[in-house]
Image (cartoon, rainbow, N blue to C red):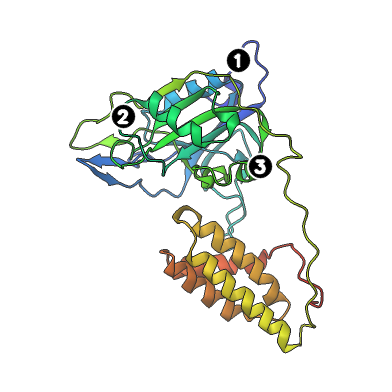
Amino acid sequence: MTPQPHHARAYAGAPIDDTITVLRCARGLRLAKMIRSTELVDYDSTRTFDAWEVDVATLDGLCGIISGLIDRPRFCIVRGALIDGPKATKIRRLVHADPQTGDAATLRDVPHRWVALDIEGISRPDGIDAADLTACASHAVQRLPVAFRDAACLVQATAGHGIKPDLRLRLWFWLSRLTTGAELNRWLRGAPADASIFRPAQIIYTAAPVFDDCEDHLPVRIVRLAGSESVMVPSPAALAPPPRQAPKPLPAADSPRASAYAWAALRNAVVKVRNAPINSRHPECLAQSRNLARFVNAGLLSEKDMKDAMSDAIFEAGKTREEGEAIAVYALSHPSTSPLPEGIR
């Protein structure tokens, strides 16, 4: 059964303090990977979605929603809440307005009690069969912070599980408090979980793969792991960002030394974008471009040099120069709000 909008759902005896935003693409498109023999065919590309928010109050409620989407390849979810919710049609996934098209933002970043963790890069022990999702998940959670290890969760095999040599799982947990994506990033830094799905507009795929010319190699793709009902999250103070250090003084903007500082920042930004992990190339380029935009506005870098550097860097990271230039253009009108060091006016 397709999850219904939040006003149509109720949980007896459980206060409703969270939602999930469900997206649906157009008919004929697929938000699930396709498997042909052992070949993985990627998701279809789609620009717009219908969307609605679904209330959720417990881990059992979360399990019901995700289980109801596993056989629906047109559906997915995101962490972001609808700006003009609780329902919307034919929207793009935008946290910020698109400066090129004028399309308005549609999603806002909100904290959640639920969290999805994409687990990759953990070797599957020889004694554990890929089809034993309970054993696979029990092994994977030992690599997470201690608070996760005795908690109940919903275990979902993603498309590559049993095909790739490592574990490919999505683990859904219920948290002890509403937790922001930024807090999750700081808490789970170093854990084998893909942090990209903590962003508000990042698609979290929920459907099982579509099998074209073969049978599913896994007898089940979703199980519930027993344990405590919620994961105890550290306090907001414990997950707060470190205090910002005072900026180091710089020479005046018309000094050759100031220009040298800006060029050093440009070179460092290029290296970071080139070396960004696959799932972090776009956000890394955006962050570095917004940082460099401050130097452009201060007259220490030219727009052309900044655009060319970011376009080349993201191209070398595996994306298009056009994407890099579009990011740079956006960053120039949305520079980082962090102050430049003293001496830059």
Task: Using the numbered discs, state the Cα–Cα distance from disc 3 to disc 2 in whole angstroms.
Answer: 35 Å
Residue shown at 61% from the left, 27% from the top: 231
Element under disc 2: loop
Q: Is residue 29 above or below residue 10?
A: below
Check disc 3 and give the amino acid type: Glu
Check disc 1 and give the amino acid type: Tyr
Residue marked by disc 2 = 127
| Viewer-proximal residue among 254 and 260 | 260
Using the rendered view, name the quadrant where residue 135 is placed: top left
**Residue 183 marker:** 3
Mark 3 against mark 2, which lies toward the viewer? 2
Earlier residue among tags 3 and 1: 1
Using the rendered view, name the quadrant where residue 79 is placed: top right
Q: Position of residue 141 (x, y in %)?
A: 49, 32
Q: Position of residue 233 (x, y in %)?
A: 66, 32
Q: Residues within 10 Å of mark 3 (few under 14, many from 20)?
A: many
Q: Is residue 322 above or below residue 122?
A: below
Earlier residue among tags 1 and 2: 1
Task: Using the numbered discs, state the Cα–Cα distance from disc 1 to disc 2 in whole angstroms.
Answer: 41 Å
Please indicate, yes or no, whether residue 284 appears anywhere in the rendered image: yes
Q: Residues within 10 Å of mark 1 (few under 14, many from 20)?
A: few
Is the C-beta separation of discs 3 and 1 under 8 Å?
A: no
Using the rendered view, name the quadrant where residue 15 is placed: top right
Q: Is residue 285 above or below residue 225?
A: below
Please indicate, yes or no, whether residue 1 appears anywhere in the rendered image: no
Q: Is residue 243 left or right of residue 52?
A: right
Earlier residue among tags 3 and 2: 2
Is the C-beta separation of discs 3 and 2 under 8 Å?
A: no
Task: Using the numbered discs, state the Cα–Cα distance from disc 3 to disc 1 in whole angstroms.
Answer: 28 Å
Element under disc 3: helix
